[in-house]
Image: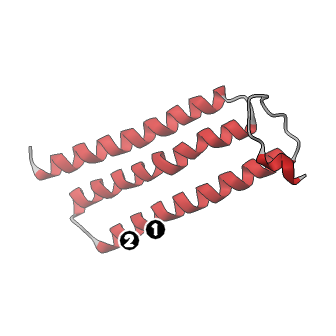
Amino acid sequence: MTGFEVYELVSAVLILGGTLLVLLSTVAMLRAKDALQMMNVFSSATGMGLPLTVIGVFVHLTGRDGFEWWTLLVSLMTIAALVIVSSMASNTLARAAYQSGAPLDPATHPQDLASED
């Protein structure tokens, strides 16, 4: 196995792993019973699946073009933005869904936001 083939294999595993996490998260979202469960399930896709895909693309580009600082910087900034923005967005959307009066599954417990009303 040449060096380029190793990079291709590693990048394929990372990209397919990230894609599989997003796919499984999508299937789980369809099975969720309320908006809060959907937001909880979706966080695994944005927190793990998309960063794995970005890392896979970085490994692929490094294998093809050689190491470049700019590619590393863009990849790290993308991963940081995905993790920070997705966590803030999921919390905000879940809070908005709860406060809008959307129906909740009776098994959703505890409901910490209920005490703020």
Furthest-left residue in this view = 1
User: Residue 79 vs residue 30: left or right?
Assistant: left
The residue indicated by pointer 2 is 73
The quadrant of the image that shows the N terminus is: top left
Residue 71, quarter of the rendered image = bottom left
Q: Are marks 1 and 2 in contact (CB under 8 Å)?
A: yes
Q: Position of residue 61 (x, y in %)?
A: 29, 58
Q: Secondary structure at mark 2?
A: helix
Give the residue drawn at x 77%, y 47%.
112
Which residue is tagged 1? Answer: 77
* Image position, residue 35 (x, y; %): 74, 38
Q: How many marks?
A: 2
Real-space CA distance between mark 1 and mark 2, rounded to the nearest whole angstrom: 6 Å
Residue type at mark 1: give it: Met
- Quadrant location of residue 39? top right
- Residue 18 percent across, percent down from the top left: 42, 43
Name which residue type carries label 2.
Leu
> Which residue lies most toward the top here?
31
Residue 69: x %, y % from top left: 30, 73
Q: Is residue 49 above or below residue 80?
A: above
Disc number for residue 64: none
